[in-house]
Amino acid sequence: MPFNNIKLYNFRNLLDKEISLNGREIFLIGENGQGKTNFLEAIYVLCYGSSFRTKQDKILIKNQKDDFSAIGQYFQDEMEHKIHFKLQKGKKSILIDDKQLRDRKELIWKLPCIVFSHEDIFLVSGTPEERRNFFDQTLSLYDPDYIDLLREYKKILKHRNIVLKRNEKELIDILNIQIVSKGLELRNYRSAITKKFNKVFSQLFKYVSQLESDLFIEYKPSWKENDTSVIIKNLERKFEQENILGITTSGPHRDNYRFIMEGKDFSQLASTGQSRLISLILKVAQGVFFTQETGKKPILLLDDVLLELDSKKRARFLEVIPEYDQAFFTFLPDMANLSYRKDDTIVYSVESGDFITYEK
């Protein structure tokens, strides 16, 4: 069982207190704006070293305060460990068992975590970048080497864009070779995972949606060519245009993914409800895929995900939810939600950032 307790200090609107989490399932019940999602965010921060809601760590600090911290005690390999995330004077640090963490990618294997939120709908209706980020995270969850490859590509891309802006043409040739080499590696990774991921995703979506037609994910790489020399020549031809723009206009950072049904891009035809369902099944498939590939079970953070599903889809969704070591569910104060709890489910009422044990 991952988290035994979490202690927070100056984190958003949450009270400074230690919260017991000694259970496989935790329900957080409360009105909007009371702190349910903030608590899920705190757990995510401990799992990833960053938020799923903002890229600015300072936003996590409670109003009129200067720093914050989150401490989680968790079990792994039958031993208790401690992870401590803190932000002081704008400097972020993460400690595991009081030892400084050198690289955030180490967290993925210690506390793999998948969050379900309302913003997930943008995985379907949003920008290509949001879909790339999802699949990059899916790959990163089970293959730390992919994280290094992605970092190397982004480093070369940043350097190449600087060179373009400075019109340093003499450096472009070597950078073209480097970016194509790493870019093709990325493309191969993404192509392979899309094929494997589709087997999980399509089956799950068909069952929960009960639609007759299959839905599958199509990977759309920016570079269509397979020959390295051809891609490099295309980059050379684009130099004048890219020099004016100051950016690299092709490559894995411009890849896209589409949701195809009956030969058409379903995201362009789907209703809001169908788009929401696709995004939910993407996260379910991510968890199922992760367990299939690693044999590990993730922590699940489910933020009001049942709210917009009808009763039949809700029941099927709960049937296919990924296996988990621990799951956190947030609900509005509707007594019907308590019907989902088990005998050992921990239930908290959340009011003004405080966590009050729910009395059965």
Image (cartoon, rainbow, N blue to C red):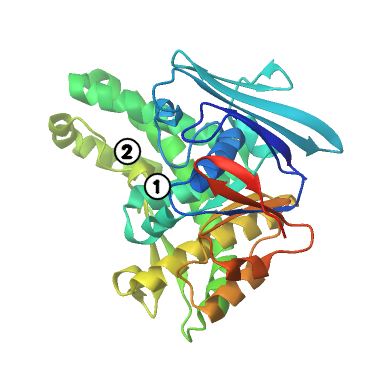
Res 103 quadrant in image: top right
Q: Are marks 1 and 2 in contact (CB under 8 Å)?
A: no
Give amino acid for label 1: Asp
* In the image: residue 327, left or right of residue 231: right
Question: Which disc, if any, is residue 214?
Answer: none
| Residue at the outermost bottom position | 212
Quick check: 309 above or below 33? below
Q: Which residue is mark 2?
A: 232
What residue do we see at 44% from left, 46% from top? 133
Label 1, secondary structure: give it. Answer: loop
What residue do we see at 73% from left, 57% from top? 345
Instruction: Give percent across and percent down for residue 327.
Output: 66, 53
* In the image: residue 12, left or right of residue 126: right
Label 2, secondary structure: give it. Answer: helix
* Quarter of the picture holding the N terminus: top right
Cα–Cα span, label 1 and label 2:
9 Å
Instruction: Give percent across and percent down for residue 82.
Output: 73, 27
* Quarter of the picture holding the C terminus: bottom right
Give amino acid for label 2: Ile
Q: Give whichever of 127, 157 is nearer the camera.
A: 127
- For marks 1 and 2 on the same chain, the one whose residue lies earlier in the sequence: 1
Question: Which disc, if any, is residue 227?
Answer: 1
**Badge 1, how many Cα within 10 Å: few under 14, some, many 20+?**
few
Q: Give whichever of 1, 236 is nearer the camera.
A: 1
Number of labelled discs?
2
Instruction: Give percent across and percent down for residue 353.
Output: 52, 40
